[in-house]
Image: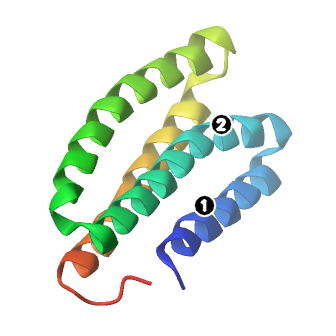
Amino acid sequence: MTPVAWMVGPSLAVWLGAMALFGVQTGVEVFLGMIAPLVVAVSSWVAIERTYRRKPAGVTAIMMGGFAGKMVFFGAYVVVMLRGLSLRPVPFVVSFTGYFIALYLVEALYLKRLFAGTKAG
């Protein structure tokens, strides 16, 4: 299974499970807590992997630029979700934090494999 599939598949499965267990309103809040970390983690993985395949020395620049952009984006995203859309904080924050940590753990493990020279997918 590819890194993107390992990020997307379990994320969607957990979201569907939360929707089934806790209802539509909580499901929407869990989805909104999931979607930003998922899209950003998948995008950053694809950018890093492509850069590594073409020019391994360019990975650090991609990661540093991505880090700065992610800080700004995630800060703004959380503010918009909580203040702009008036989501309930607990389901959104638990979802956002859980997905953020899990997705970046998956990305870190695949980066380790990539940098070790093994096939990352």
Q: Determine whether 102 is above or below 37 in the image.
A: below
In the image, 79: left or right of 70?
right
Residue furthest top as drawn: 83
Question: Which quadrant of the figure has residue 103?
Answer: bottom left
The residue closer to the viewer here, 34 or 61, is: 61
Residue furthest front as drawn: 54
Q: Are marks 2 and 1 in contact (CB under 8 Å)?
A: no
Q: Residue at x 52, y 24 (%)?
A: 77
Neighbours of disc 1 within 10 Å: few (<14), some (14-19), many (20+): some
Number of the label disc, if any, that sits on residue 83: none
Q: Residue at x 37, y 23 (%)?
A: 72
In the image, 109: left or right of 99?
left
To which residue does mark 2 refer?
32
Number of the label disc, if any, that sits on residue 11: 1
Q: Distance between the Cα atoms at labels 2 and 1? A: 12 Å
Q: Residue at x 55, y 30 (%)?
A: 90
Q: Residue at x 53, y 73 (%)?
A: 6
